[in-house]
Amino acid sequence: MRENPTENSLSTQIRQVKKYLKVKIQEDNVTFRNHIQARNHVYDLVKRTVVHGESHSALIIGPRGCGKTTLINSVLHQLSKEVDLADDAIIVRLDGLVHHDEKVALKSITAQLQLENAVDGKVFGTFAEQLSFLLSCLTAQSARSRSMVFLLEQCDMFCRVGRVQSLLYNLFDITHARSAPMCVAGITNRIDVMDLLEKRVKSRFSHRHIFIFPNEVLEGDSTPPSTPLNNYMGVMVELLSLPVAKKEVKKRGRKKSNASEEAMDSDEKIQPVPEEVLLKCKIDPKEMTLDPMFVEDWNAHVGSLAENEKVIDAIEKFCYYKANEQVFRNILFQLVSKLKPTKPYIEPPELCSLIDKTVCSEHRVKMLQSLSIVELSLIIAMMHGTQLLDGQPLNFEMVLHRYQKFAQLNSSTQSVPRPVILKAFEHLQALELVVAGRSLGQTCGEHRLYALAAPVEDIRTAVNTAKMIPTELLHCLDHSVL
């Protein structure tokens, strides 16, 4: 059966839109927004190192997902257009999680400086000797010394207890002595990173701190200051919108209307994905041909999403629970991945449902999934016992009897001593999943009546969605042991 040409065209457009938006949401790490002062500060430091040969050091501090690495990438992307960054500077990237000791770090530095042949076969006594040799090799290769930009991701990992901070000391010492043009930028999410540095490292550091906090709008960033809700609404519209081809407007005597001016301004604000990012993802920018009519409809749909009251409430809820833009990008990525010709647009309920599952999942369900197998078995036994007694409370002996019958019917279930089961039952009381009722003159805790506080729906959801649950327990959930 042949596909309808209209459906074929729609399928092609959806495929192109999904490819483009996925790159824009997850791979575009050079487009930076807000925090203009911090970005200008970093741009000034790197430019003075690359252009004027100065040496600087700084720490970029902020929580995860606030855009620290994107800030650095955007600065380098801008400098690559202004100067010949490939010939004037060398970018060395190190990560505290990967380069866990000096030998691994030196090996990575040598590889990024492309000096493996010069180091091959040589024996060095200390880290400083090998680093000095690498710098001398760079100076000898060119008539003038090339600037170096060291980017230290997870900088706090280089300062862990028991680890000699030779890497940080030598890098900061070079910038302090100005023996070679170098900019060292440490990126970390720990605000107390200075307390982790040794005294000798602190003496070489410039004590320049650049703080980036989510939803922070300083003077000069935007007027008026934006709220977290407006910030994330803007991120959603910007990431989901498609670029509009510029239309040539012929000059006429008639003046433009305000509506047409606003429409043109809004279209100009939609920044396309840089060609470097598309090429990195092996996508030819010339092949990304989108129908202008479909782009117009899509952008109008994205604008309607931003005006939907349910979407606004859901994003406001996200702002209350999370301050990580990367988590929000993951939500948008999932929405875009589900687009298809039969569902070419994003539905507001789907967006709200994803946000609910991501940021505010049911606390009781998570608590039930964190229980041990014995505790979860007691919960299921008590659930069935309560259903058989029409909601009447049970004592520990009744729950223990049902649990033992379940264990006898399933030979693979490990036998648990009574004191262990009693301890597990007491833990359920401490979590308030089992609530003690009024005892009729009975003082012993084992004979006191208890009620199940967890709803049946939450118990079923927790067991069905949990990982590593025994098959016998799943069978017991649906089939009561009389």
Image: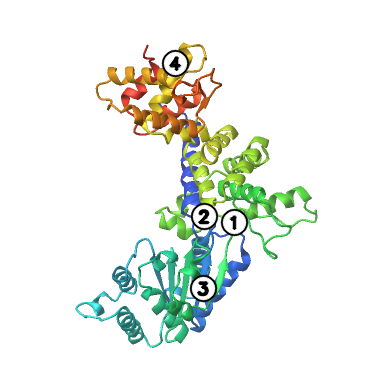
Q: Rate crowding at label 2 as few (under 14), some (14 to 19) or many (20 or more) other CA atoms within 10 Å.
A: some
**Residue pointed to by mark 3:** 58
Indicate whether 472 appears above or below 359. above
The amino acid type, in three-letter code, at marker 1 is: Pro
**Residue pointed to by mark 2:** 65
**Residue pointed to by mark 4:** 385
Look at the numbered discs 4 and 2 and tell me whether their residues touch, using CB distance below 8 Å. no
Look at the numbered discs 1 and 4 and tell me whether their residues touch, using CB distance below 8 Å. no
Using the numbered discs, state the Cα–Cα distance from disc 4 to disc 3 in whole angstroms.
Answer: 64 Å
**Residue pointed to by mark 1:** 214
Q: Secondary structure at mark 2?
A: loop
The x, y position of residue 450, in whole percent, is: 50, 22
Using the numbered discs, state the Cα–Cα distance from disc 3 to disc 1 in whole angstroms.
Answer: 20 Å
The x, y position of residue 340, in whole percent, is: 48, 34
The x, y position of residue 211, in whole percent, is: 57, 65
- Residue 69 placement, left or right of 316: left
**Disc 3 or 1, which lies upstream in sequence?**
3
